[in-house]
Amino acid sequence: MKVASNMAILLWLRNAKNNNDLATIMVRITINGKRIDWSLGKQVNPNHWVSGAGILKTSTKESKTVNPYLNQVRGEIQTHFNILSSQFENLSPEMVKNAFLGIQENTKKEKTLLEAFNYHNSKFKEKALIGKVSIKSWERLEIAKNKVNTFMTEILKCQDKNLCDLKMSFVTEYEHFLSVNQKMQSNTVMKYIKILKQILNYAVALDWIQSNPFNQFKCTYRNPDRVVLTQDEIDVLYFKELPNERLEQVKDIFLFACYTGYAFSDIELLSLDSVVKGIDGETWIHANRVKTDVRENVMLLDIPLKIIEKYKEHPFCKAKGVLLPVVSNQKYNAYLKEIASLCNINKHLTSHIARHTFATTVTLANGISLESVSAMLGHASIKTTQIYAKVVQSKLSTEMKALKEKMSNFKSHSAADGS
């Protein structure tokens, strides 16, 4: 939060109407070029005033009471300035004056939604910089703040909103904006609204607002249809000879993800230090997820081990100190599209599909327990992993129905042959 850079305090005398009259002591404070004057309500002989020092001559009798009072005034004004400058970004001279005069209701500035976002995100970033939370999570919070800012600017036609003015209609209109104007999927919309509610709860914790006006808005999620590769499709990828090195590298990284479950952002950061020998004598990867900072421990199967060995001496890996030569996410997904076409796989391959494939085809479908898969995927909650279990159940149901139909046809043919 920006603190007001400086303040100047001046004590001066307002000229008396007549030469023999007493003059009134005035205060002027100046903050960043803006100033305000007011009277202290005390009058003194102007002939006894030292204008440069803002005090009475010490040789006068009244200086013994007036000068300590003036020093007290300076000290109190400075104290109010220090307190207010730590609370408000744009501190005005009037706010300091009102605080000095005890006009509290005029010094209180309502907190706004963007202020709450900025304060929350700045604190989150401080934690991210020391490794307590993920920097990617902070980036998502910043994107969420920008979405709210765009909504207020384009739809509400305002720059910001006081927290105390927020109503349920705000979040309702925001949901519509994300769905229609931003063309987001339902689950993505809910994630942004969840962050908005999180910011409001933070403001409540800071006593910036009494209660969260969005508490009654329920975020609902739909289980998405997870696209995964079958084992046959994985095998096609593995044995397919591709026409150039760039596609071959992307294929290997994709297969590595299929057999380890690591997300693209995690694979980018893997180094040789991540690969360790376990107490069981097997080779493991130990690394924290970028998204959640939860530890992923995955035992390496033969295919990912061969891929690591293949790129051990690759110039990119040696120069960057990484495990695999990972290209940008944009190029990665573009090359995967080419690879899918060359392998006649009629699915839109993405970095997410590899992770889904590991969770379903490679592990759950082969009898690995849900708890073990959850640990390997680095899920913070097993509820997240249960989504993949439903995919496996759906796959099993389809296969059993096919078997049932096959058995039914067999019985029909047998009956026909017997007749």
Image: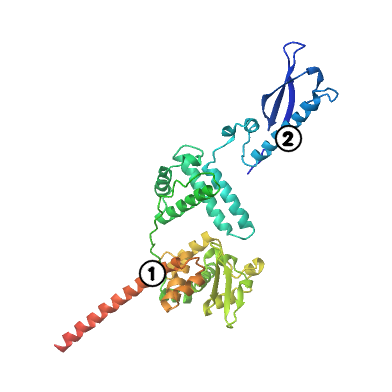
Quick check: 48 left or right of 305?
A: right
Q: Residue at x 65, y 32 (%)?
A: 100
- Helix, strand or loop at disc 2? helix
Which label is found at residue 75? 2
As drawn, 400 above or below 355: below
From this viewpoint, is residue 173 visible? Answer: yes
Residue 77, image x, y percentages: 69, 33
Whether residue 52 is visible, yes or no, is no
Residue visible at 27% across and 78% down in the picture:
404
Q: Residue at x 42, y 71 (%)?
A: 229
Q: Position of residue 228 (x, y in %)?
A: 41, 69
Locate residue 180, reporting x and y percent: 39, 47
> Is 207 left, or right, of 416 in this rendering?
right
- In the image, residue 306 above or below residue 211: below
Quarter of the image for the N terminus: give it.
top right
Q: How many marks?
A: 2
Q: What is the residue that sits farthest to the left in this orientation?
A: 419
Foreground residue among 56 and 164? 56
Disc 2 from disc 1: Cα separation = 70 Å
| Coloring scheme used | rainbow
Q: Which residue is mark 1?
A: 391
Q: Amino acid at mark 2?
A: Gly
Q: What is the x, y in percent for residue 400?
A: 31, 77
Name the image quarter holding the C terminus.
bottom left
Crowdedness near tag 1: few (<14), some (14–19) or many (≥20) residues, C-alpha within 10 Å: many
